Amino acid sequence: MAPSKLLSGARVVLPTGTVDDGRLAVDGTRIAAEAPPGAEVVDLTGHWVVPGFVDLHNHGGGGASFTSGTAEEVLKGIHTHRLHGTTTLVASAVTGDLDFLARRAGLLAELAEQGDIAGIHFEGPFISPCRKGAHSEELLRDPDPAEVRKLIDAARGHARMVTLATELPGGIDSVRMLADHGVIAAIGHTDATYEQTVEAIEAGATVATHLFNAMPPLGHRAPGPIAALLEDERVTVELINDGVHLHPAALQLAFHHAGAARVAFITDAMDAAGFGDGRYLLGPLEVEVSGGVARLVDGGSIAGSTLTLDRAFQRAVTVDGLPVEDAVAALSANPARLLGLDDRIGSLEPGKDADLVVLDSGFALKGVMRRGAWVVDPQLG
């Protein structure tokens, strides 16, 4: 068990607001109301302490793919993102053959049972060929509820989310089935109309997969899915805040209409996150990463990102001008609540896991703690 600690002097972001010259006690793996006798005092004057980041949508990192890598490689990818502040991560699989994805779910379920990931997200194959993005078109299929259920069952209770083009045959019935089984139905890679999107939300869909990307643009006569997803209080909208996927005005539009309580920043990261430029595979498709931007070799579509959540946080505050508290909500509290894990993670409160991130005055990452142990020790520089 990690030694007890008292973090002092930092600006600590709590659910009730930011406390200057704050103190945060850690006893073993949990946040404590008071530091136990003999706790190690860690002076973090001039820094920020925020909750550990929670990534709902992540395909890999550190050169490793969550869709195709070995268990050891997946753990490498998870660790890469922990070094950047993501203390809780949902592993996302891209479109593939249904039997392959079912086998993949079994491997990822083992990692979920070990506590390495918070669950599994299936992004495809139940998506629209019109908005396929970096998914193999020949492997796409309509969301037959029986086939969606096959993947859910293969995940052994660890399926957290399925992205669907809900306008396709079987889409609405699949949404209802997912909701009945406690799995998030996410609308994405969709060519749905406004009316079709409203129908899917009424059926139980609660997430917009990377809002704005891989869906029809907002139109004044045909508002499409974006308007429906932004206006409904039941929907959480994912945003990829890397400066590539979204214009800053689009991000501001989402925050203005959805509010800070309904936005979740995600990475949608692929293997190259935290690793570097080069050639990679995303599912069966070849990707070229240049200057940190991932694009399909064939066609040039954006293929996920190389984003890490510490960069998303820093950009949100320093470039987009969001209040720190709103960035914390989007990176920690909101995704934790959506996953049903907000009793353990997502905020700095006594009794919760000691998952936190230390940032300097310019919001660059300096420390990461997961369950009371330093992943990145701020005292080691």
Image (cartoon, rainbow, N blue to C red):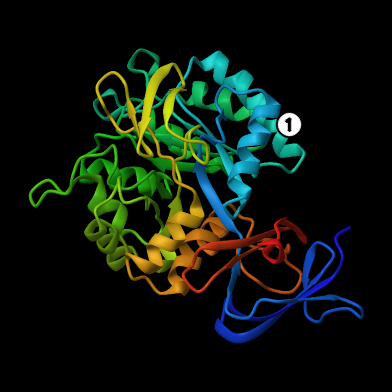
Residue 293: x %, y % from top left: 35, 38
Label 1 secondary element? helix
Q: Residue furthest front?
A: 381
Choose between 298 and 185: the one closer to the eye: 298
Is residue 248 shown to the viewer in this render? yes
Residue 272 relative to residue 350: left or right: left
**Residue lying at 48% horizontally and 34% vertically, measured from the top left:** 272
Residue 139: x %, y % from top left: 40, 15
Q: Within the image, what quadrant is residue 209 found in?
A: top left
Residue 279: x %, y % from top left: 42, 23
- How many numbered marks appear? 1
Q: Quadrant of the C terminus?
A: bottom right
Mark 1 crowdedness (10 Å alpha carbons): few <14, some 14-19, many ≥20: some
**Residue lying at 26% horizontally and 26% vertically, measured from the top left:** 300
Say above or below: 233 vs 195. Answer: below
Q: Within the image, what quadrant is residue 85 found in?
A: bottom right
Residue 271: x %, y % from top left: 51, 32
Q: Quadrant of the N terminus?
A: bottom right
Residue 123 relative to residue 241: left or right: right
Q: Residue furthest right?
A: 37
**Residue lying at 27% horizontally and 46% vertically, measured from the top left:** 212
Residue position marked by numbered label 1 in the rendering: 110
Choose between 217 and 76: the one closer to the eye: 76
- Kind of residue at badge 1: Glu
Residue 154 relative to residue 264: left or right: right
Choose between 131 and 175: the one closer to the eye: 131
**Residue lying at 50% horizontally and 63% vertically, measured from the top left:** 364
